[in-house]
Image (cartoon, rainbow, N blue to C red):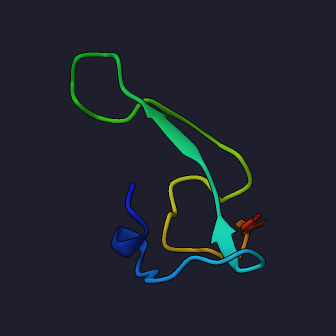
Amino acid sequence: MPWSLLGVSSPAAGQQYKFDVAADFGDNGTGKQTAQTMWVGGLNNYQDTSQWGSITLGA
């Protein structure tokens, strides 16, 4: 994923960003989500970043 897609023009060491990882599952043939797993965020609310962790860019 390009940094520009995230609105970052010049990523640099030491910058911090809010961060989370999620996976949605939907294998019942309906095309709808049947389960979800997340690293630290709140379930089914990607717009609420209050529970996200932080990631700091390295060198």
Residue that appears at 70% across and 66% down: 52
Can you give x and y, in whole percent of width and height, for residue 12 in the image? 65, 78
Q: Position of residue 55 (x, y in %)?
A: 74, 65
How many numbered marks, from 0 up? 0
Is 12 situated above or below 56? below
**Image-quadrant location for residue 3:** bottom left
User: In the current view of this chain or complex, which residue is farthest to the top?
Assistant: 28
Q: Is residue 13 left or right of residue 1?
A: right
Q: Which residue shows up at 50% across the image and 64% down it?
A: 46
Position in image of residue 49 (x %, y %): 62, 74
6 to the left or right of 21: left
**Quadrant including the C terminus:** bottom right
Q: Residue furthest front?
A: 59
Q: Is residue 39 above or below residue 55?
A: above
* Extreme residue in the left direction: 30
Q: Nearer the viewer, residue 4 or 45?
A: 4
Task: Give the residue drawn at x 74%, y 54%.
Answer: 40
**Residue 23 percent coordinates (x, y):** 51, 37
Instruction: Please identify the quarter of the rendering in which residue 29 is found.
Output: top left
State the image quarter where residue 9 is shown.
Answer: bottom left
The answer to which of 4 and 37 lies nearer the viewer is: 4
Q: Quadrant of the N terminus?
A: bottom left
32 left or right of 19? left
- Along the line of sight, the residue nearer the viewer: 4 or 30: 4
